[in-house]
Image: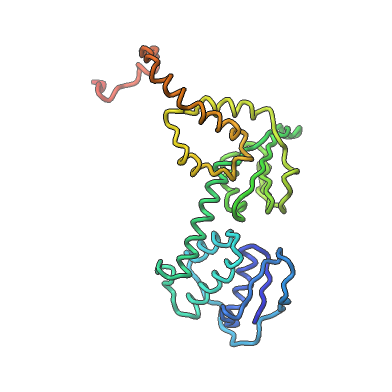
Amino acid sequence: MHTARIKPTLESWREEARALLVRRVPPDAVLWFDASDEPSLFPAESSPPPAAVSPTPRVSAAFMELARTVAAHTDERRWGLLYRLLWRMTHGGERALLNVPTDADVRLAEQWRQAVSRAIHKMHAFVRFRLTGKDEATGREQFVAWFEPEHRIVRLAAPFFEKRFAGMDWSILTPVECAHWDGERLHFTPGVPPSAAPNEDALEDLWRTYFKSIFNPARLKVKMMQQEMPKRYWKNLPEAPLIPELIAASSVRVRTMLATEGLEVKPAPRNAYLESLPRKDHPEP
């Protein structure tokens, strides 16, 4: 039995898997461990057991894309699953394996990919930056956010923030890994405890005021809201303390809205520029 102790990254798994594949070490002869885990009862081997050596097989871009997402899942079986899929598609001759959704390995990999994709979506939605200062040299504002992702998704989610908040310096701190953007370079550092993150800033009062103003009690669906905004994320959302109060007051607010007469619709103010534009229903001669 070969013990493969790797860093919990796709790159580390890929390097080890390639070496095992070349030596034709079957999946059921490999035990996979994250190097960050507690020491194993099984010491790591410096090299796989002797076996026939074969050229490095090539795999599809679709598999690498699947592996990139599945590698971010926290289930400790993910490395073994990915290697088993890799083995079957190469030495096993099942090159179209990913096109068989009923296969147990493919189905599990897809379930984990969907779980990771959902976690990325939640991170994009629920990261809340706090203003911590301004860089005197560049004049750029600096923001820090604390987030507790369900999976190891920081590297997969960070490009979204790089593109959306390119004009400010920011750091997203998590227990597993942290992402940092300085206007030129996106880089990553090890995870930190919650105490490393700021608790609150002056902008949060503005954000809570805005959230309260856009809350529409007539469209409230509590179960749907909690499905889209799971309570596990509430502790890091500055607007979350308002939610119970807004829900409790929603019925009264709806009745008040229904009892209030509608306001008279006023015509839009005249605008010389808009009036100068040709209208589709009255084209110029």
Q: Residue at position x 72%, y 54% from top?
A: 190
Q: Quadrant of the N terminus?
A: bottom right
Return the residue nearer the eye: 50 or 141: 50
Return the residue nearer the eye: 272 or 240: 240
Which color scheme did the rendering employ for the protein?
Answer: rainbow
Q: Residue at position x 72%, y 34% from top?
A: 132
Looking at the image, the residue that sits furthest to the left is 285
Q: Residue at position x 45%, y 41% from top?
A: 224
Q: Can you say whether 198 is above or below 202 in the image? A: below
Return the x and y of residue 120 as percentages of the image width and height: 55, 50
Return the x and y of residue 136 as percentages of the image width and height: 76, 32
Q: Residue at position x 73%, y 48% from top?
A: 193
Return the x and y of residue 16 as percentages of the image width and height: 63, 73
The quadrant where residue 95 appears: bottom left
Return the residue nearer the eye: 246 or 155: 246
Residue 181 in view, yes or no = no
Q: Quadrant of the C terminus?
A: top left
Residue 94 in view, yes or no = yes
Return the x and y of residue 91 as percentages of the image width and height: 50, 80
Please tell me how many numbered marks the rendered image carries.
Answer: 0
Q: Can you say whether 247 is above or below 26 in the image? A: above
Left or right position of 273 against 187: left
Left or right position of 182 against 164: right
